[in-house]
Amino acid sequence: MSSERDLRLKESDYDFAILHPALRRLFGASDLYNYGYWRSADGGRITTLAEAAARLVQLHVETDQGRGNTRRLLDVGCGLGACTGLFAAAYPEAEITGINYSARQIAHAERHHAGPRITFRQMDATALNFPDQSIDCIHAVEAAMHFHPRRRFFEEARRVLVPGGRLILTDVLARRPTTFIPAANSEASISEYARTLVETDLQPLEITDILDDTAAPFAKVMHANAMHAYGRAIEEDVSGYLLVLAVNGSATSNVS
């Protein structure tokens, strides 16, 4: 049986996954990398991975009702930088920082997606190098399941968020530890996930399982493109796909 040490991937492992030629072909020129949200704003079905991946970022934006008051925003686990650019378009008054622990991915992001309000920094999500109460909003698009541990990222998010600041995530629940999801991130249900947030002094306002519109159709795309091992791994290991809104401070929660 693999030990927890064995399940911790190197920076190059994540680079291999996000830059794999077959996946880059499916995502096209978008520079995005996520399972996608396969339901359009009007409730219809999306048919391409690149469109679904961008729609997932749009869903993050729609979840944030406070975006008009945002001046500092973090995109944690920013990948190749495309998500960060989409957030900058959605938050026109905000300074946006994308962070990632991969030097290669940050270099790509700086070349292709940096701008007057967009910067990128190589950084560990569990050790955020920002002052206390300096950030209005944090987005983490399909990334926190990789952070080792996720709980420490929550603690850091609470520290750097202003009072009332928002943490918005799409995140994966797994049936068992995998090479990409360590055993430390063992929350198996919405209630367990909400409890971890509360224990780190974050107040969950909404947590919704959107598996049927994210990981499930993505697995079908993998099978349709002869990437059967990847498709089977998602079907066998992913038990939930959560859309999460939490705040730093007390508020009314819709989480049961």
Image (cartoon, rainbow, N blue to C red):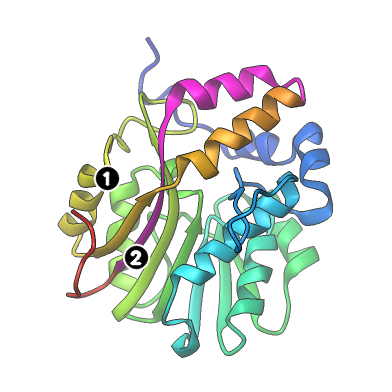
- Name the residue located 34 percent from the left edge and 65 percent from the top edge: 157
Considering depth in this image, is 113 or 110 the residue closer to the camera?
113
* Residue 154 in sight here: yes
Q: Sequence-wise, which precedes: disc 2 or disc 1?
A: 2
Label placed on residue 157: 2
Residue wearing tag 1 = 190
Q: Can you say whether 24 is above or below 64 in the image?
A: above
Real-space Cα separation, disc 2 to disc 1, in angstroms: 19 Å
Considering depth in this image, is 119 or 71 the residue closer to the camera?
71
The answer to which image quadrant residue 96 occupies is bottom right
First to last magenta residue range: 225-246
Mark 1 packing: few (<14 Cα in 10 Å), some, or many (20+)? some
Q: Is residue 54 magenta?
A: no
In this rendering, position of residue 247 left or right of residue 80: left
Q: Can you say whether 73 is above or below 179 in the image?
A: below
Can you give x and y, in whole percent of width and height, for residue 206 in the image?
31, 61
The answer to which image quadrant residue 222 occupies is top right
Residue type for callout 2:
Ala
Residue type for callout 1:
Ile
- Name the residue located 43 percent from the left edge and 68 percent from the top edge: 129
